[in-house]
Amino acid sequence: MAYKYCLNEPTLDGNEIKYVTDVLQKGWLSAGGEYTKRFEQAFASLIGVKHGLAVQSGTAALHTAMLAMGIKPGDKVVVPNYTCGACVTSVLQAGAEPVVIDVEPNTFGMDVRILEEVLKSQTIKAVMVVHVYGFPVRDFDKIVELCKQYHALLLEDASEAHGATYQGRNIGTFGDMAVFSVRSEKMIGVGEGGLVLTDHTEFYDRARFFASRAAPHRSEKDPWWHKYIYTDVGMNYLLPHLLGAVGLAQVEKFPEILKRKRTVGYLYKELFSSVPGIRLQEIAPSSEPCFWLNCILLERSEEEVRRMGTELMMRGIEIRPAFWPLGDLPAFKRYASGSQEQAKELFRRMMVLPSSAKLTAEGVKEIVKEVRLLMEN
């Protein structure tokens, strides 16, 4: 179905065609190309960390980060209930055990009170914090301190939070490592891709090692006959050169993309503020979101929310559902810790609305008008 207003769209109005054409003319398409190296450096600089490694998806970035941090069988990693399933599967891929905890209902991020209870009662190797829809987690400074206090590594899943800030610092600079998705609908998008970021050279070296088949003898100084020596179980995760070229062009124009996304997000907040029966995702104190997605929570039954979403899509407005609570899925139920009710409530009440950087003010107003009409019926 063709939508009048799409959830998200790639912005390909910069140097994408120029850089991709250059790659094609030079003929190096696979990993290790010059544009990919420049993309990694530019993205790391944009966020404000030393090292960046581009891989083939956000899921690959999560798994790579797990391996780089030394997560192994017998370890436990805390994961929030309201997020993409890749957050849990990356822990399982590393052979570790996820501990899925509920979220707080306003920013949809990890609940610091529940986290503290878990850290007190169990030995936790790492905590994965997810900044949902580009909104920084509430009490993030307290979460950082708890991780230090209990000697737990901190991984930021910033897949949706390009350009978001907390206490004046970029999201992606607080943890031991951070991952970003650069799938096509993200604010920097290449089709499918992800990045692993860190200030720790040791973690970066391990990330590159595991993402390149665990083959350590591939530099120019190594004997050529050592190229296919594998010293561990590695993955073929490195980003192809063509996608690195697209990524570099996207980073170059990121400030304008971020400006557009925030314009859309703040306009939604203004227009929905006076609509009864609708609640919006809250902005945590001392933070500024990037508004990757904009959602509404409706004071309606689950059936009514589904009916309204279906009607909006019939009117050409693309709708996305909430994440299905991880602790309520058959594959992950055994890892749920404590109540999962907040995430279930988000799922029952939520619709995610078009949030494209190409969305105009007139488009936002029309979408809000259509939602209001449905609320009145």
Image: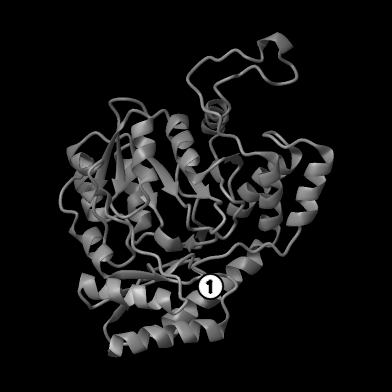
Q: Nearer the viewer, residue 349 or 103?
A: 349
Horizontal side of residue 299 vs 188, given as left or right: left
> Measuring 27% from the left and 63% from the top, which residue is drawn there?
347
Q: Amino acid at mark 1?
A: Arg
**Residue 36 locus on image (x, y percent):** 69, 42
Horizontal side of residue 343 vs 363, given as left or right: left
**Residue 78 locus on image (x, y percent):** 29, 42
Horizontal side of residue 39 vs 80, given as left or right: right
**Residue 247 locus on image (x, y percent):** 66, 51
Residue 292 visible in this rendered orientation of the protein: yes
In the image, residue 93 above or below residue 285 = above
The colour scheme of the drawn protein is one colour
The image quadrant that residue 320 belongs to is bottom left
Judging by the rendered image, the residue that carries numbered circle 1 is: 262
Residue 273 visible in this rendered orientation of the protein: no
> Measuring 37% from the left and 55% from the top, which residue is drawn there?
141
The image quadrant that residue 118 belongs to is top left
> Measuring 61% from the left and 47% from the top, which residue is drawn there?
44
